[in-house]
Amino acid sequence: MRKLVIVGGQPLKGRVRISGAKNAALAVLSASVLAGEAVVVENIPDINDVRVMVDLIKSLGAGVAWQGGDSVRIRPPATVGSMPAYHLAKKLRASNLLLGPLLAKFGRAEIPLPGGCNIGVRPMDLHFKGFAEMGAEIRLEKGCIRAHCKKLRGTRIYLDFPSVGATENIMMAATLAKGKTVIENVAKEPEVVDLANFLNCLGARVRGAGTDIIKVEGVPSLEGCRRYTVIPDRIEAGTFMVAAVATRGDVELENVILRHLEPLRAKLGEAGAEIFEGEDRLRVTARGELRPIDIKTLPYPGFPTDMQSQMMALLSTVPGTSLITENIFENRFQVVDELKRMGARIKVEGRLAVIEGTDHLHGTQVKATDLRAGAALVVAGLMARGTTEITNTSYIYRGYHELDKKLKALGADISSVENGA
């Protein structure tokens, strides 16, 4: 096991290129199972979660080859035999995204109950409801999800909550269903739109992604795709934006989609940061004293829950009282105890965190409890006085490609060392 060692106090300065979006890449890799021919996907981040997903689809019979850099060639399985290995599925919540493609293409799917970060209850009832309304039979047996059908049929499905995973899973299943599927109250996240674009590249007929209603006309089969490029990661970009402000630095981010970052850009601007926008880049700096703000996490286009922990770290040293209301995952405040070890003054009342800004944080030993909590501790370590040691860094590398190297190139005093060294 490795740990990150950060000596704080260095303002970040320079340029950083943002990698492909983790959550979009995982969905696109799952959807590649639906293809009838080989596909090539570019801008795939080489991170642990992606490696697990690659191993999962290989275990289904797909051929997967990295073609140098961030490009992956996938030969989809023609038949499917055994269920994906439990030891892989338990590592990755997104393993459940294989249900829709397998059910649609082969008429059956068996997936171990998925794992992932323990950030709260993420029930799959909406996934099951959608599949059942399309004609599938689903049961849970001995820790596995088993589903089968003769042929999925198009229908009208209303989601009680705009779940990203349920939206993506049902949308993928509907591409090969008989007739038209209308999915209402869907998630609008950019990753959903990216998946829809990829499916259409394969020959699917998906309309409405990014709005409240997605309509899918089923087709007999899908084709291949010679090249598809995954969108940039808005959460990685957001993490660097927050880190730039936290260290009072001056950082230019390349390879970003500006509208995806608008909720965060607005809140950082409200706090006093300066943000200058270009065509596919932006520059973030903070020169004066920052102001406390209130944040409420909401489904897109609201403020992303995946940026809440990083903002909490930043606000812990902003004078005054800031409030964060977590409306998506009830366990997103696990990072609070670790930040308090560094001197933060945070009180949690249910889904509300009250942050009283302190003069500074101090470096100490802390532990990442989930992916975004790990990113928050990196932000805290960058602005703390002294040395911060972060363990459980495997969480961090599930979602960030070479985070320590990118930060070091911006001037951070950060290194990855063997735990115990």
Image (cartoon, rainbow, N blue to C red):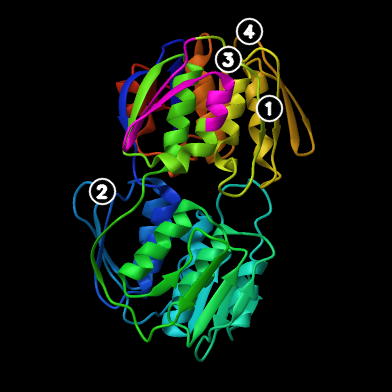
> Residue sitting at 50 percent across and 73 percent down?
215
- Return the x and y of residue 293 as percentages of the image width and height: 65, 24
Tag 2 residue: 70
Identity of the amino acid at label 1? Asp
Asked if residue 121 is positioned above or below residue 140 in the image, the reply reads above
Separation of disc 2 and disc 3 at Cα?
Answer: 37 Å
Q: Nearer the viewer, mark 2 or mark 3?
A: 3
User: Which element type, helix, strand or loop, lies under badge 1?
Assistant: helix
Residue at the extreme right: 349
Tag 1 residue: 337
Question: Does the magenta portion include 130?
Answer: no
> Residue sitting at 50 percent across and 24 percent down?
379
Identity of the amino acid at label 3? Leu
Q: Nearer the viewer, mark 3 or mark 4?
A: 3
- Classify residue 162 as left or right of residue 207: right
In the image, the segment drawn in magenta is: 266-287
> Residue sitting at 57 percent across and 34 percent down?
373
Identity of the amino acid at label 4? Asp
